[in-house]
Image (cartoon, rainbow, N blue to C red):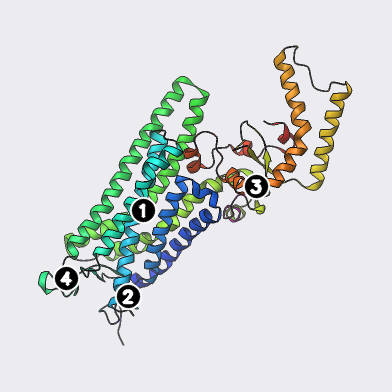
Amino acid sequence: MTHYSPTAKTLALLPKFTGFLSFLGSTYIFQDVVIHRKTVHRVYHRLVLGLSCSDIIASIVNILSTWPIPEGSDGVYLASGTTQTCTAQGFFNELGNLATPLYNASLCVYYVLVIRDGWKEDQIRTTAEPLMHLIPIIVAFTIAILGIPFTLYNNSGWLCWIASYPGKCEGDTCTRGEHADIFRWVHYAIIWSAILSVTVGMYSIYRKVRDEERIQSQEMDEDAVRRGGKSKKVAIQAGLFVGALYLTWIFTTITRIYQITTGNGNFVLLLLMAIFFPLQGFFNCIIYLRPRYLRTKSRNRDAPMRRLLYLTLYHESHPIHGLQLNRSDSGEGATNGYRLRPRETEEEWRRRRSSTASFYSIRNSGSNPVPRLNDTDEASCAINTVMAVASVSDYNNTKANETEGQDDSMVAVEEPSVDSDAMEAVEESSVDSDAAVPPPAVQDTIW
């Protein structure tokens, strides 16, 4: 009976659990974007979708861990595959783990264009987005495919990747993967280039947000404050995605450098790599859900944490949130002609309808319950506006109920459009919590 070291068992088993968490996170993002198809029309969501797809591939590789490694490999726990299964795992390992950081770089470029350069959604879609997808896909597929004829994919410890066979062989003494060292350097050069570009992009975003805050403090302009606040929120979201990239690759990078310089492995570094390297999809999912969690928390201030997390997992168009859409034309909190409001009971609807009818009939009867501000045309217009809102409130509610569940209403709930479509697609929580869910008593008079 073969005995395996604790290190071998840990490296074989641990990535299965962390990889499964990452798989769940990326799969959740995938289904959330695809099921609500309207969101796929946004550049941001398409980039997140590409990032999730590449991470799903990498997560499956990590879940398999040592299983595809040829059976009988020395010191490898649970190895039960063949050379062919090892080659297949190595191919998808290289494909997923190259495309994921490159998609992170594309996402960072998107943030830079939106926050620093102020590009609109249409401009990004037509000019920059094709390259944001083509570069990760073409580079990842090219390197991954080249590994097949060069027989690069072999046992590298706890999964199949670019490695020589037998281990530590050189040149002609290698049966397979004699050019493994060259391709490993190419692999890490691509990864580190992506991380460097992300770092530079985040620094430029930081400088832009800092300059906007300085302008706000000097001018105290409401529009500048609103834009600056929105940019800061998006910058935080961008920083979290970048932080997930750093956390995923930092221990892998340190481990590889240590192995190259010393020729040996370090158990602590290998353990940290096995924990954090497969977790990017899990981190991405938490960051992706963060704006929705903040909105859910603002509407359910007294709810326990467990309830908030449960609600966050459901898209905001789901009936569990108790929200419906009210038609409106403009105003703070109105998004694409709709606003969020608490779902009314039948009794509340009848009481509000009765109140509205009474107000309108009293106004027509000659009594004047509305305070007369002054005799200017502006005051008369304001009073007439209130009357017009009251008279059509029931019609608007009916139309809102008819449109609920349609694709446009999904967009209205998930991505309010107040300023820039590109900005809103990322930030997704720009509407203040109090504005997003106005009190029922004043819903129909806020335009």
Decide which of tag 2 and tag 4 comes sooner along the chain: 2
Residue 69: x %, y % from top left: 30, 75
Residue at image position (43%, 28%) is 213
Mark 3 to mark 4: distance in Å?
60 Å
Determine the secondary structure under disc 2. Answer: helix
Query: Which stretch appears magenta?
Result: 310-317
Q: Is any atom of residue 96 visible in this view?
A: yes
The residue most toward the left is 172
**SS at badge 4:** loop
**Which numbered disc flags the more N-terminal residue, 3 or 2?**
2
Relative height, residue 220 to residue 6 (above, below): above
Q: Is residue 442 above or below residue 370?
A: below
**Residue 222 picture location, percent across and down:** 52, 24
Query: CA gap, disc 1 to disc 3?
Result: 33 Å
Furthest residue to the top? 375
Q: How many marks?
A: 4
Name the front one of labels 1 and 3.
Answer: 1
Q: Is residue 240 left or right of residue 87?
A: right
Q: Position of residue 268 (x, y in %)?
A: 30, 63
**Mark before the other along the chain sequence, 4 or 1:** 4
Of the numbered discs in the image, which one, if any, rests on residue 85?
2
Q: Nearer the viewer, residue 280 or 414?
A: 414
The residue to which callout 3 is attached is 302
Front: mark 4 or 1: 4
Mark 3: give few (<14), some (14-19) or many (20+) Cα within 10 Å: few
Query: Residue 405 — which label?
Result: none
Check disc 1 and report the residue beneath it: 247
Q: Is residue 59 above or below residue 378?
A: below
What label sits on residue 168 in the rendered view? 4
